Image: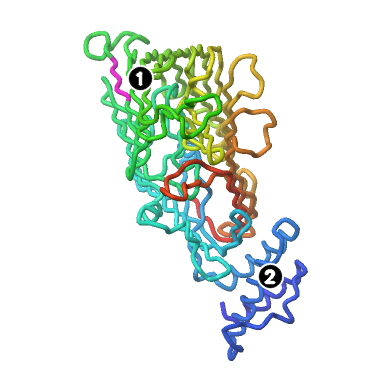
Amino acid sequence: MTNNCRKPLFVSLCDLCGLNITAPEPNPFGASKNAKDREGDVLYEVSNRIVRTSLLERSYGSVAVILAVWVLSVNHLGAQTMPQQDPRMAMLTNQQSVSGGIGVTVIDGKPYYLFNIMPDLSFGKWGIGLDVNLRVGQDGKIRQGDFKDGYSYLRLLRYIRYGQKNENVYARVGALDFARIGHGSIIYLYRNTASYDLRKVGVEFDLDFQKGGLESMYSDVAGAGVLGLRGYVRPLQFGQGASIPILGNLEVGATFASDFNSNANRTWGDPAGTIRNAEGGGVLSIVGLDVGLPLLSHEYIGSTLYADYAKILSYGSGTAVGLNLRLRGLGLVTLDAKYERRFVGNQYLPTYFDAFYEHDRYQVIDTSRFMSKAQILKSTQSFEGYFGEVLVSILGTLNIVGGYQAPVGVKNAGTLHLMLDVGDALPGILVSGGYDKKNVGSIFKLDNNSLLYAQVGYKPAPYLVVSMLYQWTYTEIRDEQSGQVVGFKPQKRIEPRVGFIARF
């Protein structure tokens, strides 16, 4: 495509959205001398307008401008894929993608030009994902928070994996978006990615030898983090009992989980929760026992009855009894469902290491006070609770995940987990999203108890995507003297994007 045919298309798109480019602002790089330079004049004018235009009031104009920039710069595009999703959803879709684009991102009210590549590829049992983002501010400098140390460069590799969770061999290095151990009573949907600027490199490794196996995870290879280990055995598989229907696959497991962060066990030393009188600190550990009995084990249908017991060392304990159901091969719909009843003792919290744990571990309220999850644990009274979850895949393309857990009869105390990916169910439309919220009162009110991403876009061609991404996560608060992370505050990102996506 030559410059002569690029520029008229660019002009027509801008005119369509009410952007006047007939009198561009002066280009600081000098007057244009040829067609390529004139194209640079137009790009400079549009870049200024992108920064000045309100994304809320003129979002349609921003999308059109970004589309025009893509037309002018098609040979320089990288890849852009959707944000992280529940690995169980990825297993249902069994898709890989290469996608990408350029655009504008707004982080805490400050705009950046975005150049992004995030391929998500599979080669047999192997999978790899990258997360390469170049955000350039109005001053022409790359955003400091993206590349502030050597660890930041390591995080460009989003993950490398072998196999999938629940297969005989599974290994993953990188982002842990929804890690879980066993039935999830101790570690469930744990994320080491809750803060965009404090993403960590973690490890998962599972083995299943048929007669027994191992599940393991560690959240941060560069520092003190969350460790989870579970060993399990199927005792009747060692003898003639292996042929006994139902009982032959009985599984017994033991779990050890611990957080080695120095603030993991920090509690109040006085009613005001002052920092100078804080008690404890250091390691917080949990041990557990579980038993699972597969009631149905078939290629098309499966169901397991299970019971878990967990004890938080130096604190309380709790139990859970649950049933899960799996339906496959129905042609139209694939279904996973789970229901669990919980019996919680004093000073015990189920799924202690969850999606919000990195945020909840320890937070400085002001110069003298703090809050911690260990303090919440210390003040928890006994209760009964429940947990339900459903995963649905329709025709392998429309995928929905929904989960909710709460104490019985207690208002504004539940935790919600939602995910949606419409895939190719809506021709020409891209819709995906994920939402986690605790202490649910007003479901869709974003606050310190929320994690959200949502992406909506349009495909003018099978490979071309014009979209808007909204993400609500957290950014760290560091002590001015020590540089240590002492808490988190909400961070929102708004990114109009244009690029291409190819699924195969």
Contact flag, marks 2 and 1 (Cβ < 8 Å): no
Dot 1: within a 10 Å radius of its alpha carbon, few (fewer than 14), some, or many (20 or more) residues? Answer: some
Q: Which residue is mark 1?
A: 287
Q: Position of residue 284 (x, y in %)?
A: 38, 26
Residue at image coords 50%, 46%: 476
Tag 2: amino acid? Arg
Q: Is residue 463 above or below residue 209?
A: below
Q: Find residue 205 and report its horizontal and vertical position in percent.
A: 31, 35
Q: Does residue 125 appear in the picture of this structure?
A: no
Q: Main secondary structure of the magenta part?
A: strand
Please state which of residues 356 and 314 is positioned toward the viewer in this rendering: 314
* Extent of the magenta region: 230-234
Residue 29, quarter of picture: bottom right
Q: Residue at x 75, y 58 (%)?
A: 57
Q: Nearer the viewer, residue 72 or 377?
A: 377
Residue corresponding to mark 2: 49
The number of numbered discs placed on residues in the rendered structure image is 2
Q: Residues within 10 Å of mark 2 (few under 14, many from 20)?
A: some
Q: Is 117 located above or below residue 408 in the figure?
A: below
